[in-house]
Image (cartoon, grey):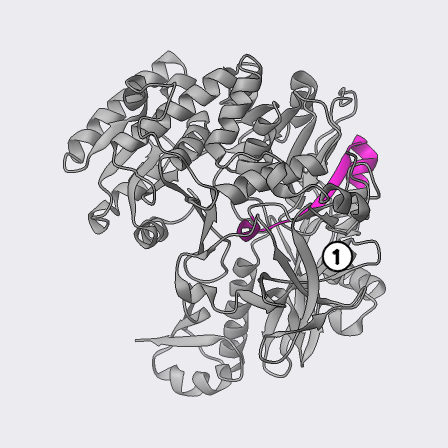
Amino acid sequence: MVVQTLSDIESLEQVPLSERGLACSTYEALRQAARCSPQAPALSFFADAADFRRTYKWNYSQLFADITRAANAFNDLGIKPGEVLAFILPNLPETHFTIWGGEAAGIVMAINPLLEAKQIAGLLDAAKASVVVTLAPTAGSDLWPKLASQLDQLPIVRSVVWVSMEPYVAEPVRGALKAAALKERDLHRDIAIHDWQSLMSTQPHTHLKSGRQIRRDECSSYICTGGTTGLPKIAARTHGSEVFNAWAMSAHLQPRSGGQVIFCGLPLFHVNGQLVTGLMPWTQGDHVILGTPHGYRGEGVIPRFWEMVEHFGINFFSGVPTVYAALLQNECEGRDLSSLRYAMCGAAPMPAELFREFERRTGVKILEGYGLTEGACVSSINPPHGERHIGSIGIRIAYQNMRAVVLNDAGEYLRDANVDEIGLITISGPNVFNGYLEERHNQGLWIDIDGQRWLNTGDLGREDAQGYFWLTGRKKELIIRGGHNIDPKQIEEALQAHPAVALAAAIGSPNAYSGEVPVAYVQLRPGQVCNAEELEAFAHLNISERAAVPKRIEILDALPLTAVGKIFKPALQQREIAKVVQEEVERLGLSNIAVEVVQDNRRGHVACIRAGTAQEVLAPLLGRYSFQTEWLN
């Protein structure tokens, strides 16, 4: 069925979901795919963008065999249903085997490899992970050193599995990897360290040794959400939610022929990488191209991306706005992009100018969507065969309800928002997770609507008359100037339209009088020259709401990004707090004052200040601001 409008979604729902024949688990979904097309190409991996034609390949039969071997290896290490296996890995084929094999054995926890050692340890401890899969000692990688430095604080971790880069590197490098591994084993004799290849080589590939029959409602994975303070929240998801979301996404993209070629460049610790460019295409018989251990961040991936599209015949890829902005810096003229049909954009709002320019220059349809870890991955998306509204996150997926609601002062449901009225976005359906691992994180998470539990996404938005949703910001990202709510998106959209601007981020800067005032940070396009005064004049002309005009615009060489490629606003907010403190210090004519802004798990941003006797005069001035302060001796 072709999905063009909300009516088509409603027509899909005439068949009860229970009659759709969905697999009960991710393992069973992958088994079905292997039975349908065992010899079809399933996964190709290249380790180096400079040599992307050299790939390592798996057909569906081989892919499922390695997933089964991994499940059996983890079972031998003591991973049973309810037991947690964590992985700290770059994008490797073994990462996929760990994810889906781990879900067949127990619960898989994905950890961002860019986190600091103490944060990694905190997450492992919170989840009670007993087995950790990580990269073996490798030159240029700090994954093993970070984990090793924390293992004496993690008595619950009983086994570590090393994944080596040996299969993907030249012979001289293999020797160095083996030598490094031997040296580290000698240094860590008190830790049970297992070699991935050795574990896999002894396992059967035809069946699960555990004999496990997995139910839909069983927990499959722990995924860390992008928290702004302290450790991320840990979301507990189910097999049923992941299988359903993969099916619903593919249903939204119908009609489509099997055997599509999908590029994966987003990290595999993130739900988009796992589901949109993993489980979903594999349930449809597609071929996934896994591009370098570091995905889009890999050296040469973005500069050679259009060449890769031409070579592999890529039909679809998924990215965030910063990826699209980077791709536009590389010429696609002369490349055959006829295979490329769609590109999905999510995780952050896409500036309208970037959207238009990308489509104009490449001819590729962008499908803007919306999703969150708590909803498996995708909750809404523009229909590929219907109207695509720039700036809209599209229409809801089938069988998942979505609405904008108005709450009362107590945070309880009052009514549905009217058409085009801004409200709180809420969702309910088979893709919604069970809740966060730590119970205190579930406070205020659920909203009771007519006796049914709905997820409070924390996002503000509206639904138009055609059923398209439009985000207007997150509550926690709103700039509140003297009680007036300012959506940072309108500032960012205006600045993004300037021809010299590649990326823009608007945040609230602490202000003693107004609480916050808007400021903006921008990153220029390569080769462009522009100053802050010019951008400020441009903002005055193009931002209609006077209160939203930035009080200051700063140009940075590069905006801070998360591992997924989203602009990391907390880093900019920390920068603003430090700037405010320094301004007050200078106003008082003080010197030798040290300031560091950190994120505290309970208090949010905290300015840690070493001021000595100057604390007496500085403390009253800083007390006028909303951020927390901590005075150091």
Residue name at image x 67 percent, y 54 percent: 401
Give the residue at mark 1.
470
Find residue 412 and report its horizontal and vertical position in percent. 60, 75
- The quadrant in which the N terminus is found is top right
Residue name at image x 81 percent, y 64 percent: 419
Question: Which residue type carries mark 1?
Answer: Trp
Residue name at image x 40 percent, y 56 percent: 437
Find residue 557 and report its horizontal and vertical position in percent. 61, 48
Decide if residue 249 is on the left or right side of residue 202. Answer: right
> In the rendered view, would you say 58 is above or below 73?
above
- The quadrant in which the C terminus is found is bottom left
Nearer to us in this view, 380 or 113: 380
Decide if residue 147 is on the left or right side of residue 36. Answer: left
The answer to which quarter of the image holds residue 15 is top right
What crowding class fits label 1: few (fewer than 14 Cα within 10 Å), some (14-19), or many (20 or more)? Answer: many
Q: Is residue 553 magenta?
A: no
Q: Which residues fall within the magenta stretch? A: 357-375
Find residue 408 and report its horizontal and vertical position in percent. 64, 78
The answer to which quarter of the image holds residue 457 is bottom right
